[in-house]
Amino acid sequence: MTSQSQGIQQLLQAEKRAKDKLEEAKKRKGKRLKQAKEEAIAEIDHYRLQREKEFRSKQTNEMSSQGNLSAKIEEQTIETIRNLTSSYHKNMESTMKKLLSTICDINPEVHPNFR
């Protein structure tokens, strides 16, 4: 009977050691999962910061090129206005003379179909 009880005791102790090893393995696995999750979050944050930096750089380049484009359009508009104004002043007098002569200089004639 004592050998049986010793055998049972040994089995219970072996079962307890196995259970302890299982618990320890579960704890290590949990720690590894937690560490992997933290590393993944850190990597994601690093990647996000890198992409945001690239985005801001591209955005700044686009905004500056749009500013240059806007300045170029403004310059072209001013040049066109200057050209139109100078053309107006140059041709205004002759155009007014032509209009006034057409309106005011009336030559009364009998229409050819009138009998």
Image (cartoon, rainbow, N blue to C red):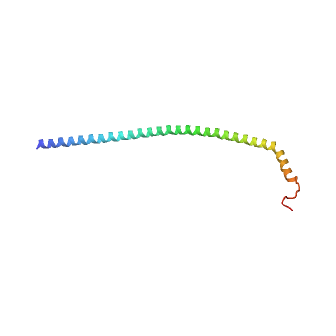
The residue lying furthest to the left in this view is: 1
Indicate the position of residue 104 as horizontal and vertical percent values.
87, 53
Residue 63: name its quadrant. Answer: top right
The residue lying furthest to the bottom in this view is: 115
Indicate the position of residue 80 as horizontal and vertical percent values.
72, 42
Q: In front: 89, or 38?
A: 89
**The C terminus sits in image quarter:** bottom right
Q: In front: 35, or 100?
A: 100
**The N terminus sits in image quarter:** top left
Question: In the drawing, does residue 76 fall left or right of residue 44?
Answer: right
Question: In the drawing, does residue 46 fall left or right of residue 110?
Answer: left
Indicate the position of residue 107 as horizontal and vertical percent values.
88, 54
Q: At 87% from the left edge and 58% from the top edge, which residue is drawn?
A: 110
Indicate the position of residue 39 as horizontal and vertical percent values.
41, 38
Q: At 12% from the left edge and 43% from the top edge, which residue is drawn?
A: 4
Q: In front: 95, or 70?
A: 95
